[in-house]
Amino acid sequence: MDLRGELRARLAALERDGLYRRRRVLEGPQGVDVVVEGRQRVNFSGNDYLGLANHPEVVAALRRGAEDYGAGAGAAHLVSGHGRAHHALEEELAEFTGRERALLFSTGYMANLGAITALAGRGDTVFEDRLNHASLLDGALLSGARLKRYPHADAAALRQSLSAGSAGDASTRLIVSDGLFSMDGDVAPVAELAAVARELDAVLMIDDAHGLGVLGGRGGGVLELADLGQDAVPVLVGTLGKAFGTFGAFVAGCAELIEYLIQRARTYLYTTALPPAMAEASRAALRLAREESWRRGHLHRLIQRFRAGAGQLGLVLMPSTSPIQPVVLGANASVVRAGTALFEAGFLVGAIRPPTVPVGTARLRITLSAAHTETQVDSLLAALADLAARPEFRVGAMP
Ligand code: PMP
């Protein structure tokens, strides 16, 4: 097979469909003020929601961690890679999430793959929200369990789907949902999902990668908003690369869940532990996220300011009270052109296309951070106003 020729054809097809993705090279640190290919831009596309990624205390903890523990962990956790820093972070994450224990994974993608494949297998059924993150869907596919997807945020449809199944047999029924949806910015109906799980004897797993640190007065995420504890949501996943500004992820739950994942989660067993210095940086970030609640206050004021301004421009926003504020344009080509126009105007905004989002719902994914200023939000709104005046972008028009 002419591999080069075959791949050229496939790449050309992606280009033709407006699905070709290009990386941009950031010169310095990530954050709100970035230098992209030599040009200063205001970043409205990252997940550093609390503005902690470049915080001097987080960076100092990383540096100190490297001095104390070296650059890498050197082995998987069960071999000789599990260090004091990892252990301390796990205990702090358990306390923060109100769970008995927490278990670190190297990424959120791996946490989801590991947890789902450990909990469900052949003969079991995994029920997933249609808009769940790719790692949650991939986990179910890899597990060998039956995968049933229910309409977005529709607990009634989930109940129906579960009731139709083989209740009463010994198989595991696992319900899996994002907490705060990464591409829409809305919140899952977690209380209703928990009620369905309780009534129909299923297990509920919530991946609150985007909500933890951000939502709720304490930053406890969607489960703090809904006041749900470990009994209602026995499997909670969080990531450290977003609001906490560092890298890594965790699963939190009862002691038996964590012990079982240590035995059985293949993405935990067969991979190098994350660098202990990174665990030290995450400990500093977690402390700041908890103590500096003004970051959440400022962020939520910016969210309100953005939504009010966008509303005045006539933009159609999603029902999101989170830092994720997508503007759906529909066509892939429109979103690429809009992203480029915003870049030329001084902003970095994600142009999100299928398969990340459903076909026909390509969108600008605007994200806000506590590190943004009101002035920066206002100038983004001004750039969006310019864009909205150009008919070819149909800004805010639903497909
Ligand atoms: N879950 C959700 C909902 C996510 O949005 C992401 C990252 N985009 C992940 C998990 C994966 O996390 P990580 O980047 O740590 O692999």
Image (spheres, grey):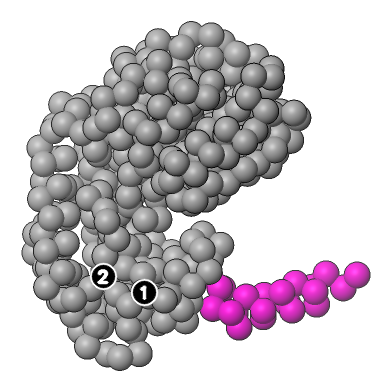
Image vertical order of residue 86 relative to residue 393, above or below: above
Amino acid at dot 1: Met
Residue in view at x 11 percent, y 41 percent: 297
Looking at the image, residue 28 sits to the left or right of residue 123; the answer is left
Q: How far apart are marks 1 and 2 (CA)?
A: 8 Å
Residue in view at x 33 percent, y 44 percent: 187
Could you say where residue 90 lies in the image, as x and y percent from the top left? 41, 17
Q: What stretch is highlighted in magenta?
A: 1-24
Image vertical order of residue 346 relative to residue 112, above or below: below
Could you say where residue 326 lies in the image, as x and y percent from the top left? 32, 62
Q: Which numbered dot is residue 398?
A: 1
SS at badge 2: loop
Query: In the figure, residue 124 lies in which quadrant?
Result: top right
Which of the pair 62/116 is nearer the observer? 116
Which of the pair 131/332 is nearer the observer? 131
Could you say where residue 280 lies in the image, as x and y percent from the top left? 36, 24
Which of the pair 120/200 is nearer the observer? 200
Residue in view at x 12 percent, y 55 percent: 304
Q: Name the residue under label 2.
A: 316
